[in-house]
Image (cartoon, rainbow, N blue to C red):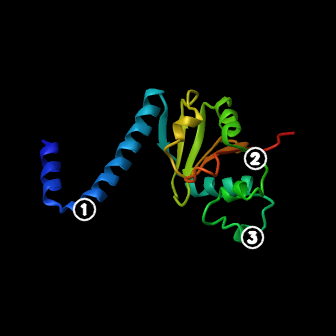
């Protein structure tokens, strides 16, 4: 029944609008595949109430010692991960970053996206690997103790990045 409604809408649209519909459907499909993959791994995803505090703490932890002038110079406000792409924080990159993330013991962690005021908590997440985030853009994954962060960007030549706080 719903397919009939969708078909009716599609048939009413001019040809030049169908490309917009196509790309919207691709986005919906990729989001469905992403979430379905996590569900199959037994991951639970919940919205975190104190998102603003967590985002601030990510910045205070992982962008510490980066001056406001330097942040402006590297367009930090546009993409927080510029601290890694501009090599202002020494981190692991590409396949080495993936392996570091994959090898972590990670029962639960936070997930946030660039420019979004929302933070998610992923639990029962021990089977999650870096490849699970390959279709995500500008996603920041980090543990509840803020000792490490893994970032997958929207640019194929940038990242992914893995940064771990020295716990000496």
Q: Nearer the viewer, mark 2 or mark 3?
A: 2
Q: In the figure, 73 relative to 134: above or below? A: below
**Mark 1 crowdedness (10 Å alpha carbons): few <14, some 14-19, many ≥20:** few
Q: Which residue is mark 2?
A: 91
Q: Which residue is mark 1?
A: 17
Horizontal and vertical percent position of residue 153: 58, 51
Horizontal and vertical percent position of residue 42: 47, 27
Q: In the picture, which quadrant includes the N terminus?
A: top left
Mark 3 and mark 1: Cα distance apart in space: 44 Å
Q: Earlier in the sequence, mark 2 or mark 3?
A: 3
Mark 2 vs 3: CB contact within 8 A: no
The local secondary structure at tag 3 comes to helix
The local secondary structure at tag 2 comes to loop
Q: Nearer the viewer, mark 2 or mark 1?
A: 1
**In-image side of 81 versus 3 (left or right):** right
Q: Quadrant of residue 143?
A: top right
**Mark 3 crowdedness (10 Å alpha carbons): few <14, some 14-19, many ≥20:** few
Q: Earlier in the sequence, mark 3 or mark 1?
A: 1
Which numbered dot is residue 27?
A: none
Q: Residue at x 73, y 57 (%)?
A: 63
Q: Residue at x 15, y 49 (%)?
A: 7
Q: In the figure, 78 relative to 153: above or below? A: below
Q: Residue at x 75, y 70 (%)?
A: 68
Mark 2 and mark 3: Cα distance apart in space: 20 Å
Q: Count of labels shown?
A: 3
Mark 3 vs 1: CB contact within 8 A: no
Q: Is residue 50 visible?
A: no
Q: Which residue is mark 3?
A: 68
The local secondary structure at tag 1 comes to helix
Q: Nearer the viewer, mark 3 or mark 1?
A: 1
Horizontal and vertical percent position of residue 48: 52, 48
């Amino acid at each position: 029944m719903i397919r009939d409604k969708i078909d009716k809408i599609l048939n009413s649209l001019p040809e030049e609008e169908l490309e917009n519909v196509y790309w919207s459907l691709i986005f919906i499909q990729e989001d469905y595949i992403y979430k379905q993959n996590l569900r199959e791994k037994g991951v639970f995803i919940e919205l975190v109430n104190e998102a603003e505090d967590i985002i601030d703490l990510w910045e205070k932890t992982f962008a510490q010692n980066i001056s406001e002038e330097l942040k402006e110079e590297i367009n930090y406000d546009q993409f927080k991960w510029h601290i890694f792409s501009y090599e202002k924080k020494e981190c692991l990159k590409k396949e080495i970053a993936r392996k570091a993330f994959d090898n972590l013991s990670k029962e639960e962690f936070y997930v946030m996206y660039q420019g979004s005021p929302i933070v998610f908590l992923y639990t029962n997440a021990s089977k999650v690997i870096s490849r699970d985030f390959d279709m995500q853009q500008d996603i920041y994954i980090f543990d509840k103790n803020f000792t490490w962060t893994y970032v997958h960007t929207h640019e194929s030549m940038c990242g992914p990045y893995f940064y771990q706080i020295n716990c000496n």
